[in-house]
Image: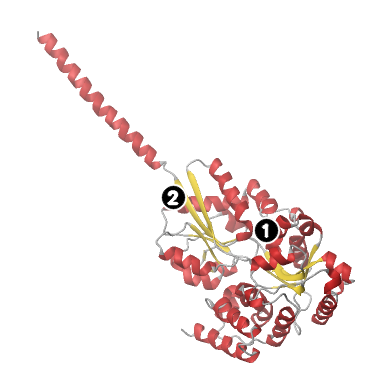
Amino acid sequence: MKTKKFLLTMLSLFLLLSTVLFGCSSSSTSESKGSEKQVTLDIFQFKVEFKDQFEQVAKQYENQNPGVKINITTVGGGEDYGVALKSKFASGEEPAIFNVGGPQDVADWEAKLADLSDTKAAAQALEGTLDGVKKNGQILGLPYNQEGYGLIYNKKIFAKAGINPENIKTYSDLENAVKKLEANKSSLGIDAVFAFPAKETWVTGLHLSNVFLAPEFNSNVVNAFNAKTVEFKYGNAMKKLVDLQNKYSVQPTVSLDYSKQVEELFSTGKVAMIQQGNWVYNSIADIDPELAEKNIGLLPIPVEGFKEDSIPVGVPMYWAVNKNKDQKVVAEAKKFLDWLYTSDEGKDIVLNKFKFIPAYKGYDSSKISDPLSKEIYNYAQNGKTIGWVFMGYPTGWGMDKLGVNIQKYVSNKMTWDQLIADSKKAWEEARNK
C-alpha cells in the first residue's frame, strides 16, 4: 500500500514537473518568437522617378532578409516633399528612413537624425559629398547619388533645324538657336521651343536660381547656409534666361507642371528643349525608348559674366535615419543602406536599375548606362560644373518665396526689380530670426 501511495505521489510530481517544464518551454518559445519579430522600415522618400524600381529593390531585400518588412511612401514631382515630411512627423507616424537636403534641413531635423558615421556607405562616400550633412563630428545623411541638370534637347529637332549643339557655348549662341527654332516651328512640327514649368517652383526657385546664385557663394552650400544676405550678383543674367524660356514656351507657363513638361510635351516631340536633369531619363524612356537612348543631349545653362559652358552637378538629397525609432529599426535601416550602396548586388542596382551617377567609391564609372548621366559625368571630368547651393537657402525661401515671385513675374504681377528686392528681404528676415 505504501509502495502504491509512493508511486502515485511520484506520478503526481512528474505530471506537475512536466506541466511546469512545458509551461517554461512555451514561455521560452514565445519570448524567442517575440525577439525575432518583424522589423519594419517605413521609408518616406522624394524621388518619384525611381519609385517603381526602388519598390522592386525593397521586395528583393525583404526576400533575402526574412523578418524585414519595408513600406515605401514617395512624395515628390509636383508635391512639396518638405511640407509632406512635416505632416508625416506631425501625424505621429514617424518614418525610419527619410530625406534631408543639406545644412538647412540638418538644422531643421537635427533632433531626429541618427549619426551614420559607423556605416560602410559613409566611409565610401566621395570626397566633398558629405560636407552638407556633417555637424559636430557626426555624419547625419548619406548621399542618394550625383545629379546634374541643364537644357535637355531633342537631337532630331536640332538636326532638322540645322543647329549644331556643339557650337552653343554662350548665352548669345543659345538665344540664336532658340530664335531659329522659333522661326521654323511649323516645319519642325513643334508647339514651342521650350516647356518652361513655372508651376514647379523647385525647377525655378531652386534649380534655375542655383545656377546664378552659386557664384556668389563660391559654389559652396555651407557658405550659402551661413550667408546673412543674398546679393543676386548675376540677377540680370538670370532674368535673361527666365525671359528666354518664358517667351518661347508653351503657355501659360504658370500652370505648366513637371508631368506636362516632361511626359506630354518633350517626350512626344512637341517641344525642343526643357530645363531638367538626368533623373528624367526613365520618364522619357517609358514613353519613347528610342528618343531616350539615342536622341537627347544636354546643353549648359549659361551664366553671362561667370561660366557659360557649365552645368550644375551635386547631391540632390541625403538618406537620413530616425534616431528615435527602436534601436533594432535603426540598425536595420543602416544595414539596408549599406547593402544598397556598398554590396556588389546593390552597386549593380544603383547603376543599372536606378540609372544613378554614383556618389560612392568602388563603382565602375564606365558602366554608367544612360546618355544623360554619361554627359554629366563628362562635364564633371572636364571641370565644367557649378556647385549646388540651393540646399543652403533659408527654409522655404527657394520654392515658397523666390519660386512664387518668379510666377508673379512671368504673370506680369511683379517687376524683376520687385522680385529681387522682395526675395532679398525675405532671405535677410529668415537669417535674422
Q: Could you say which disc has been placed on residue 328 in the image? A: 2
Q: Are marks 2 and 1 in contact (CB under 8 Å)?
A: no
Kind of element beneath mark 2: helix
Label 2 Cα crowd, 10 Å radius (few <14 / some 14-19 / many 20+): few
Q: Is residue 391 left or right of residue 160?
A: left
Q: Nearer the viewer, residue 166 or 295?
A: 295
Q: Position of residue 135 (x, y in %)?
A: 51, 69
Q: Position of residue 275 (x, y in %)?
A: 71, 71
Q: Nearer the viewer, residue 261 or 406?
A: 261
**What kind of residue is marked 1?**
Pro
Q: Is residue 18 left or right of residue 341?
A: left
Label 1 Cα crowd, 10 Å radius (few <14 / some 14-19 / many 20+): many
Kind of element beneath mark 1: loop
Name the residue carrying label 1. 358
**What kind of residue is marked 2?**
Lys
Q: Can residue 273 be seen by looking at this rendering? A: yes
Residue 357's quadrant in the figure? bottom right
Residue name at image x 72 percent, y 57 percent: 287
